[in-house]
Image (cartoon, rainbow, N blue to C red):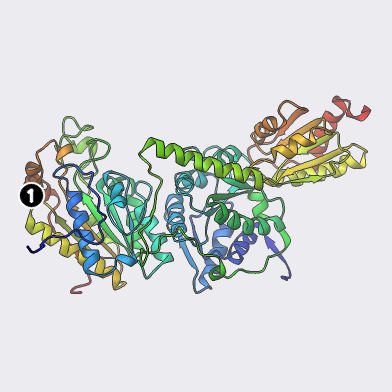
Amino acid sequence: MKKVFNRPRSLKDAVFHYCPGCGHSIVHRLIAEIIDELSIRGKVIGVPPAGCAVLAYNYFDVDMGEAPHGRGAAVATGLKRSLPDRIVFTYQGDGDIAAIGTAETIHAANRAENITVVFINNGVYGMTGGQMAPTTILGQISSTTPGGRNKDRDGVPIDLSEMLAITNGSVYIERTAVDNPKNIVRTKKAITKAFKVQMAGLGFSLVEVLSPCPTNLKMSPVQASEWIGSTMTTYFPLKIIKDTVGKL
Amino acid sequence: MSEKMLLRGSHVIAEAAVRAGCRFYFGYPITPQNELTEYMASALASLPDGVFIQSESELAAINMVIGVSMTGKRVMTSSSSPGISLKQEGISFLSGQELPAVIINTMRGGPGLGNIAPAQGDYFQATRGGGHGDYRNIVLAPGSGQELADFTKLAFEYADRYRTPVIILGDGMMSQMMEPVIFPDPIDPASLPPKPWVLDGAEGRPSRIIRSLILDVSAMEEHNWKLFRKYEVIDREVPEMEQFLTDDAHLAVIAYGTASRIAKGAIKRVREMGLKVGLLRPKTLWPFPKRKLLELSRTITDFLVFEMSTGQMLEDVKLSLEGRGRIHFYGRPGGIISTPDEIAKVINNVYFKKGLNRV
């Protein structure tokens, strides 16, 4: 019998704690596969966020240094400036990067910090139990927007990736999704490119991944994935937002 | 051996940090300590391995410190009171993650925006942890230009030895004053012993995690006790206090930093009038030199705590003396700098009111 599916070397032999249908498990696996394929496992330092994915350090078999909520880009700045030949990535949720950590992220991009950011956008606070995120879409019901997100009271969902694209130091920013196999393949290509951008020393790279959170969206896993394609992408279109790099 | 140099306090700290092998500095402008940041900007720019970032906030600065510290290299940030409040989140993380770092607080008047004059209102914040959670910082209180140099070197050594953040607590007076200083010889950072716990990529070894999240309550409790045991060791090994003219003293003024300089001037004046008064100057505020203080209560009956606050170290003096001796307090908060004459009058009042002239 032929073995056709292996655990990537860069993932530990551990069971994910993530909910059924959660996108974190998919993106973790993609990142681990990419680290293996680029043969950089011994050079990688990862920075997990506060939120569901803080426990990423239990899954990635690479050096991991936990950052306070939202401060991933600042911690990564310190790591990368100290060890410029290592590959430093942060893994951050929408609350982490687009609410509490907005300043650190924008300034790291503006300084052209040569780091890679994986930004998981699921439109809701996961670990704290389904509160409104900066990326919650208008009308979306959350535990702190029981009548739906209201533009006049709550503002509109924030386009952090587009904001980051304005900074001179960002060189590659793409928004993808993990709602179907085609988009999962696209996401892997994007994150691979983001790591390659860093390996080539070109500047700040970020991939925003629209990712399902069935538990807090109060949907089935299938519904949550479908909701990304039908609704979330109308606010957050899947596209290359900035690419000054070209082919790598 | 280095030659004697005349430098302002902020520059002394910065030069001493570079000589201690610190090649990483992150900071955000705030008065009255900008000269320190500016000195680091020039000094690190001239070194091939130097990294200086003027960060977008104090929060970003302390988190950059966390990142560098995770790689095991000597790193420093500095600020003044309101900025130090912003750094507390990071200081709590440094403590929980057992990461070394040196943090300079040039205290100014507060609370809130306060003013930019020298004050000592951040004693509680520095010595009681300051951020959330069950932790302590080593807090050093230099009293001269020379000590700014010596304590900065010491701060890096303590931070590495105990894997904990170390705070140097100064004020605008200490930072601006120019004094002659002899610097220790520079250390090549490459000569420092490697740290076995750093993050530098898991090449040829198991991967490592540096974290402070410990969801299992038993493990979290054990982590708290582990930190506590470390603090007990620090409490045995680190406390230091200067004693000035205390051998025959009936009364001792207890003061640190700028206040101790003023007190020393006052004590010299009252000594000329025959009053048996000395100075006790804690060089470490946490751990507080409590055992030494208690021991001295066998011969000294009266303790006059003088602070540029409404009375914060006062609590540590009370705790240390365990009810022995009479404790008096004189405080000038808000950025007021007393004169030695003013303190001499206060000493006189206490001395004669308590009949110490008749002892």
Residue at left offset 65%, top offset 43%: B285
Indicate the quadrant containing the N terminus of chain B: top left, top right, bottom left or bottom right: bottom right
Which amino acid type corresponds to the residue marked 1 in the rendered image? Gly
**Relative side of A165 to B110, left or right:** left
Residue at left offset 39%, top offset 35%: B217
Report the front residue among A133 and B114: A133
Quadrant for residue A40, please give it: bottom left
Residue at left offset 22%, top offset 72%: A245
Label 1: few (<14), some (14–19) or many (≥20) C-alpha neighbours in 10 Å: some
Report the front residue among A100 and A212: A212
Report the front residue among A210 and B234: B234
Residue at left offset 32%, top offset 56%: A106
Against A151, is A70 above or below?
below
- Image x and y of residue A132, in percent: 23, 38
Against A107, is B230 above or below?
above
Q: Which residue is mark 1?
A: A229
- Image x and y of residue B12, in percent: 65, 61
Q: How many marks?
A: 1
Chain letter of mark 1 equals A
Inspect this view and state whether residue B17 appears: yes
Indicate the quadrant containing the C terminus of chain B: top left, top right, bottom left or bottom right: top right
- Image x and y of residue B303, in percent: 77, 32
Quadrant for residue B267, please give it: top right
Report the front residue among B261 and A124: A124
Disc 1 is placed on an element classified as helix
**Relative side of B185 to A246, left or right:** right
**Relative side of A154 to B33, left or right:** left
Inspect this view and state whether residue A159 appears: no
